[in-house]
Amino acid sequence: MNQDYIKPDSWSIIEEGFESERVKSSESLFSIGNGAMGQRANFEEEYSGPTFQGSYIAGVYYPDKTKVGWWKNGYPEYFAKVLNAPNWIGINLLINGESFDLFKCTEVKDFRRELNMKEGWYERSFVATTPEGIDLAVKVVRFLSIARNELGAIKFDVELLNSDATVVFEPYIDSGITNEDANWEEKFWKTLDVSTRDQRGFITSKTLKTEYHTTAFMQSQVFKNGHLVPVEASEVLFDEKISFRYSLDAQKGEKITLQKFGGYVTDMNHKREELVSAAANVLEQAVSAGFDTLLNEQKNAWSKIWEMADISIEGDVKAQQGIRFNIFQLNQTYLGEDARLNIGPKGFTGEKYGGSTYWDTEAYCIPFYMATKDQHVARNLLTYRYNQLDKAIENAKKLGFTNGAALYPMVTMNGEESHNEWEITFEEIHRNGAMVVAIKRYVDFTGDFSYIPEKGLEVMIAIARFWQQRANYSTQKDKYVILGVTGPNEYENNVNNNWYTNYIAKWCIEYTIAAIDSVKNEFSQDHDRIMAKTGLTAEELARWQEVAEKMYFPYSEEYKVFLQQDNFLDKEIIPVSELDKTQRPINQKWSWDRILRSCYIKQADVLQGFYFFEDHFSMEELEKHFDFYEPLTVHESSLSPCVHSIQAAVLDRMDQAYKFYLRTSRLDLDDYNNEVKEGCHITSMAGTWMSIVEGFGGMRVVDGQLSFNPKIPNGWEAFSFKINYRNKILKVNVAPGKTSFSLEGNEAIEILVKGKAVKVEPNHLVCV
Amino acid sequence: MNQDYIKPDSWSIIEEGFESERVKSSESLFSIGNGAMGQRANFEEEYSGPTFQGSYIAGVYYPDKTKVGWWKNGYPEYFAKVLNAPNWIGINLLINGESFDLFKCTEVKDFRRELNMKEGWYERSFVATTPEGIDLAVKVVRFLSIARNELGAIKFDVELLNSDATVVFEPYIDSGITNEDANWEEKFWKTLDVSTRDQRGFITSKTLKTEYHTTAFMQSQVFKNGHLVPVEASEVLFDEKISFRYSLDAQKGEKITLQKFGGYVTDMNHKREELVSAAANVLEQAVSAGFDTLLNEQKNAWSKIWEMADISIEGDVKAQQGIRFNIFQLNQTYLGEDARLNIGPKGFTGEKYGGSTYWDTEAYCIPFYMATKDQHVARNLLTYRYNQLDKAIENAKKLGFTNGAALYPMVTMNGEESHNEWEITFEEIHRNGAMVVAIKRYVDFTGDFSYIPEKGLEVMIAIARFWQQRANYSTQKDKYVILGVTGPNEYENNVNNNWYTNYIAKWCIEYTIAAIDSVKNEFSQDHDRIMAKTGLTAEELARWQEVAEKMYFPYSEEYKVFLQQDNFLDKEIIPVSELDKTQRPINQKWSWDRILRSCYIKQADVLQGFYFFEDHFSMEELEKHFDFYEPLTVHESSLSPCVHSIQAAVLDRMDQAYKFYLRTSRLDLDDYNNEVKEGCHITSMAGTWMSIVEGFGGMRVVDGQLSFNPKIPNGWEAFSFKINYRNKILKVNVAPGKTSFSLEGNEAIEILVKGKAVKVEPNHLVCV
């Protein structure tokens, strides 16, 4: 844990006291988003201290030219980057002509930030003394509207505490921004038009290369002591900036308020020539509704989200705060309505990693969205990959694969690969398997098999083809091997026969073959269409079968465990507990080669396979593997603790499960990895949800039936969550020794609890 | 073979006919150098066609900021680059006020380049018609003086063929140059002073960061029909350039000549404040000697080099031209007098690869320099590494090694690592072994054991320490293993137990232990000093011994060969001969991961070990390994064919040996790898010499005795070479069925020929 300044609170994230070293970290933690856009919690007014400015628009990216030291054949020439978008939140504040800057104030008291997760707004307040000796009380409330996802609103209050003064607000929009994460220090935006009309400002700019046209807009109103002041602003137009200037003389004790509405409209949703009128329309409706009405809409929208997605924990406020922060961030990042979008690893909280879509979506995020939203949301996430199948085939072709084999990219925005480390880009191919796992989970959970004949099977066939071609026959083993891969544990590169990869490859082929059979029997028209489209022959199927049947799995007779890779046991096996603490985290302390030849595991690898395919293994096997691998795991990936938490819960090791739970749920709040200033770890937050629902709740789908095996960490009084299972909303409440279920709607459901069938009738609490 | 425009000639490299697509390639092939500086064969006058401008000063480098896509701990922050130096050769030519540019001429006839290797000069001549219709005959001779290594000279003749004209020469020096191989498109030089005096020009500039101060200088004279014309030049001084202007009116048929002297003096050899006066001094002596005298000096200097280094081949002019080109380039690059310098992989012919010193020096170049120069030259090369020992220890420390273990860098200028691919920089550690092999070869060949107590042993101890720490004990094998390495075959990365690496590691430890014993017995003072300095204890020695004794070597019982690495036999083994030609070279056609998991070998790997340690293995073992590995080798490294040529000769496969010989000796002339435009492969040229002397000549040192096993390729009438063996100069002439030896000096030598003792008396030809 590297920080603990966030106050425990069950519904809010709260910081108290101003420390400039914490600004970047808090800018990440207090980020807001509404699925369509988002922004770091940058100050609206000028700030000369260390800050990392970031505003982002979902789906808007830039293909930055790849930067590598040594080019390897197969690298993508361009690398899709999350783009810092034009800034619409800026409001400079001048007191008696001097620009107000928190970093320069002689005193800052009562500084407080609150991110109210229940209602979806962010507030910052403080009392500050300017170098000129003027005391101000400032309160700023900001939110991005869920109901109107092109709109954001800011209410900026200034109260003069010790003297009269001239107060000037300069709300502005600015398209002259840069990316922190730019390879070549180039600009990514070209400003096309800067205009004002009726006290509104509009900047239309386009991204270079990708040509996303976007209009950033704003309109402001000024209030004195709560009353609208009909002051005309003077305008200043620059090449890439518009600034309005509202000047008011105020007396000691008076409160001056600026309300600013702003946001973006883009040509993803509007015609290019209508961007400015669309923006004007958003502003007109916003002003006519007014700040308070908009804020009420916001509270209602979040109330609906929480109604379904909330997990409550009684008796452990830090745990409660952690899970709500995670659920809140996931919903800020992706709401599931737009199949063009996906869940970026940093959401709208930072730029790092570029691209937006990793295997994280399929491996970690889909269960959360599947269970807390309508099932079309998970289907949209699957469809995203279906829509990118052609590019995945193209990607595999670049690496020498043929016949429609597909390799989904490690990172992508538009389906093209956006990563360029050979050991990851070309070798971390297990990601392909997660695409099929996600389809299986979707079908199992929702019962909607129709996705497979409609879309899924084409993806599955292309992936099975990849696995068959990627394996090669080893004469000496008389088995098929998969050489030169990186498994989920990225602390081993270019290894042979990573068990997880081999296992998921075999499983993908077998699952696909079984699906082809089912489709043939039940959806024969689709079957014929797909066979015609893919040209799949009986001979090819036989080759798949051969590879799956003769797949090689490294195994240790001595330890009775599958080996992470062929040569794992040649390493020195020293548990993490015996590693000197000064050496941690090893990814910051050790050279890369030393990490690679160590036995230390970044995140679940063999155990990731045991997580996906839990029902393929006995409890004894799980225990043996957990006891072998967990002690060697440094959990230096945000995706690591959740899987271990779930498995520890399965093994009835609740203390350990709880420890991992805390680490995943408060990873960013407590900054375990010392990097929260770069942004939050959004995708791993879905893992936190899994830790509770699948770990503590023990939720599984067993032969089409929802099943629970509830457990509760020591000290918790109760926890509860809701599941949308096949359009039935089941609420589960777990307390020590007692689990209760209640069902919305009017149709009963039979579930399994600790293996026993329990019937839950609508609106009747069932206690077990 | 990608080109064949070089005319076969036994002593010259000749190009005929002007083709602008060949300009960059010829700029590499016709490069000149004198060990202290060198330059690509750029045209002196303006040229607007495709060209790669390059002038280089030995030892002057720039630490460019490392550019990587993804940073790995342990990467060096800076990367030493060979530096394009200020240009002193420029001579613009204006005819009637129009700048002469070969690329724009309406006709170019009789274009010819000749690099006269025997005498060490480069000539370019042609007849061209300008767009204005003026016919010129031009001949330019240029050389870099071996005798005065700060000086170069150019003689530029222009003859007016069809009309009178005003001829203007504008000789200039220019420090406003850039590097093609710059990571961040920055300039590497800062110009400090631009001045002229007495018709001489001086530009003093310094490299940024490294602060090498250099004065580029020039002085010119003009002749008409061979007679000096006392014309005053007008001068133009720019910020980073000086240009003189000599204007003459000439009549049809007249010949106007500019002689230009120029070059560099640097603060490696002069005080900074004396650079300009040193430069003036060089110019004064040059002008007073005159072009012809300087050219005669040059011929004499090269004659002395050839006297010792030449290899003559009768009956095969292309083979003859190849070996002489290789010997010529090696001598242009490094003459062995300055222990601060080394042999860059591109010499003075290009910038690629950065840095200057690879394991190439120890593995390939030392035998050539040892046998063709005084033995202090090889000692200088060894001393270069001794002087960088502290930095090699520092380098190992960065990677987590302790106790004075050293890892010599993969690439360096000043001892610091200058490479940044983790799989090479951190893992291609076998290079450390070559440092010790070079010491052993030096001691064996020269008989000068004193180098070991004086300097070598400290290097050897630090390297042995590295190997002991880098190996780890494998419980399952009950052996020491070396995990995560890249062998000489860079087409496998991060493999375990690369046989070559393990073998050389074990050998280094054992050789060092034996050397410590010898030093203890024969140089006890040195022994005590070294033990005190290194703190080597009996316990540590025991640990070394344990690692060496229990080192693991992968072996195939089925094939009876050592395996290149643990998992080599899991690969699909398909000989290169069955590989579709469209797939070659695989490093241009295949993605990196595909190369890595293929069985194809870039350059000798196991066979490199059999080359270094030939006497450890039987002829049958060599044959088995050669037959297993050579058919899988694609020879896509310039360092590959020579080793195979030598081993094919040992195995009496003279046709194969000859094929490999041609490939190594004419690699650049025939552009086998389609990249000669980037520069020549200097270090592999020493391998060509080895192919003849060690391959065809069968030269070895056996228990301190020089031994030969001469063989001759089909069709060769004879070949001959000279060896400086312990200050005895032995000339060997091999003809079919007959080898003759002659000895200079006045002391007889007993040698072995095909295993039989032969006494060679001075100045008596011995035929066998």
Image (tube, coloured by chain):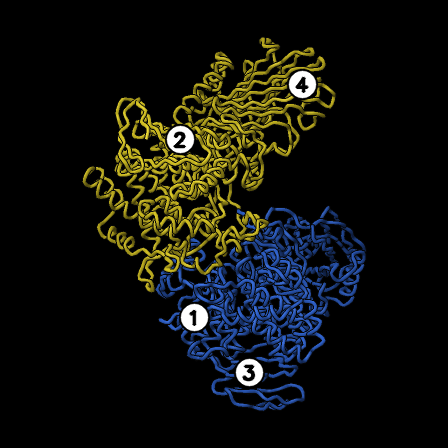
Chain colours: A yellow, B blue
Q: Quadrant of residue A125?
A: top right
For label 1, the residue is B562
C-alpha span from label 2 to label 3? 84 Å
Left or right: B724, with B658 as reference point: right
Which residue is label 4 attached to? A136
Q: Residue furthest front?
A: A737
Earlier residue among tags 3 and 1: 1
Which of the pair A182/B156 is nearer the observer? A182
The chain carrying label 3 is B
How far apart are the two marked residues, 3 and 1, measured between alpha carbons?
25 Å
Mark 1, Cα crowd under 10 Å, few <14 / some 14-19 / many 20+, is many
**Residue type highlighted by circle 2:** Ala
Disc 4, SS: strand
Check whether the beta carbons of the residues at disc 4 and disc 1 lie within 8 A of each other: no
Q: Amino acid at mark 4?
A: Leu
Q: Amino acid at mark 3?
A: Val
What chain does mark 4 sit on?
A
Q: CA distance from mark 4 to mark 1?
A: 79 Å
Instruction: Please tell me which residue is depicted at 71% across the width and 17% down the height of the picture.
Output: A96
**Can residue A690 be seen at all in this image of the molecule?**
yes
Label 2: chain?
A
Instruction: Determine the image quadrant of residue A19.
Output: top right
Both on one chain, marks 2 and 1? no
**Which residue lies under the disc numbered 3?**
B702
- Alpha-carbon distance for marks 4 and 3? 91 Å
Q: Secondary structure at mark 3?
A: strand
State the mark number for residue A735: 2
What crowding class fits label 3: few (fewer than 14 Cα within 10 Å), some (14-19), or many (20 or more)? some
Q: Where in the figure is residue B320, as x and y percent of width and height?
A: 53, 74
Q: Position of residue B293 (x, y in %)?
A: 73, 70
Q: Estimate the spatial distance between the alpha carbons at disc 2 and disc 1, rounded to whole Å.
A: 63 Å
